[in-house]
Amino acid sequence: MYSGKSGRENDSAPLALKVERGVLVAISEAQKKAVRKYKESNYDRLEISVPKGRKESLQAHAAQREESLNGFVNRAIDEAVERDNEKGAE
């Protein structure tokens, strides 16, 4: 049974897990650090606020199109910028 810990006596930190090819595997601290470093080097972060309940409806919309919420938001931004640029060219 999974206890949520690494199984080491002195380790109180929860074990990070991911599913890889249908198998649950542990994520090492080195791997988490590498992913964090990659994201910091390659991505900017934005924070948006939406009215209560709106997040769930946006997640459902994205899921219907087999997109993540992040992917949907990026696509919506790209499409809005493209439309705005087309209007400016008229």
Image (tube, grey):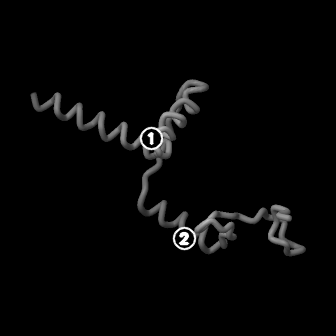
Residue 35 marker: none
Label 1 – label 2 distance at C-alpha? 30 Å
Q: Residues within 10 Å of mark 1 (few under 14, many from 20)?
A: few
Q: Which quadrant: the C terminus?
A: top left
Residue 71 on image: x %, y %: 43, 46
Q: Nearer the viewer, mark 1 or mark 2?
A: 1
Left or right, 19 with respect to 58, comes to right
- Which residue is drawn at the image coordinates 23% and 32% (left, top)? 83
Q: Residue furthest right?
A: 9
75 and 87: which is toward the camera: 75
Looking at numbered disc 1 in the image, what kind of residue is underneath it? Arg
Residue 68 sits above or below residue 56 on the image = below
Residue 65 marker: 1
- Which residue is drawn at the image coordinates 60% and 67% (left, top)? 20
Residue 28 on image: x %, y %: 66, 73
Residue 41 on image: x %, y %: 44, 63
Residue of label 2: 34
Residue 45 sits above or below residue 29 on the image = above
Q: Which quadrant: the N terminus?
A: bottom right
Residue 8 sits above or below residue 36 on the image = below
